[in-house]
Amino acid sequence: MTGNVFLGLGSNIGDRLKFLSGAIQKISENESIKIVGISSVYESIPLGPVNQNDYLNMVLKLETSLDVYGLFEFVKKIEKEIGRNKTVRWGAREIDIDILFFGSLVVRGEKIIIPHPEIIHRDFVLLPLKEIDSDFIHPQNNRSISELTEELQNSYVYNVFGNESLKLEGVNLV
């Protein structure tokens, strides 16, 4: 099992909490994945086109026996099952699931880039990461999530809900 795998989840269309909960539910049903941490839900203003709703964002920490490409295919399948419709880049979406980190792996592919290149600039990713693993070291710049959070220059988050606001049935944390 590979540990220190982090997924970023976001939604800004419709019942945002329902989309986040649905994604977590489907992830937890995969026998090759153990969810070991769930952050609070962070509400943030959108990046990109301004004529869209605000986002709910959160981070999951996983252990998985899937390789990085298997996990990527799995989360993209979940996005489709939940009802994500492809729109413009950085546009509104029902659900977005990004692999933020896959242990210390660095991948630069056509469809997948890990670590996610914008992590260090986004409080709506770093704050939930810090909540569940502040000591995790970014594999490219060798700084902890806590250090990266202290260096943030822009703020998008304006509200935080506990993860108990999600309706999660049958999701067991290790």
Image: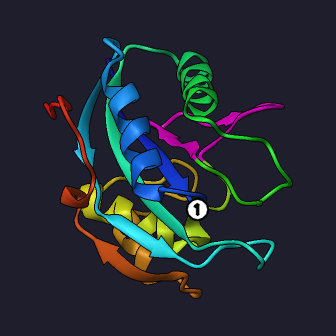
Determine whether, in the image, residue 34 is placed left or right of residue 138: left
**Looking at numbered disc 1 in the image, what kind of residue is underneath it?**
Asn
Q: Percent position (x, y) of residue 119? A: 57, 61
Answer above or below: position of 30 versus 92. Answer: above
Determine whether, in the image, residue 62 is placed left or right of residue 118: left
> In the depicted view, which residue is nearer to us: 119 or 135?
119
Q: Residue furthest front?
A: 14
Q: Percent position (x, y) of residue 125? A: 48, 63
- Bounds of the magenta segment: 95-115
Q: Which quarter of the image is occupied by the C terminus?
A: top left
Answer above or below: position of 150 versus 76. Answer: below
Residue drawn at x 48%, y 54% as measured from the top left: 138
Q: Which residue carries the number 1 mark?
A: 12
Q: Quadrant of residue 74?
A: top right
Q: Percent position (x, y) of residue 100? A: 53, 46
Callout 1 crowding tier (Cα within 10 Å): few <14, some 14–19, many ≥20: many
Determine whether, in the image, residue 88 is placed left or right of residue 101: right
Q: Percent position (x, y) of residue 83? A: 62, 36
Determine whether, in the image, residue 163 is placed left or right of residue 128: left
Report if residue 102 lies within the magenta region. Answer: yes
Q: Quadrant of residue 88?
A: bottom right
Q: Secondary structure at mark 1?
A: loop
Residue drawn at x 53%, y 22% as measured from the top left: 71
Residue drawn at x 56%, y 57% as measured from the top left: 14
Q: Which quarter of the image is occupied by the N terminus?
A: top left
Report if residue 169 lies within the magenta region. Answer: no
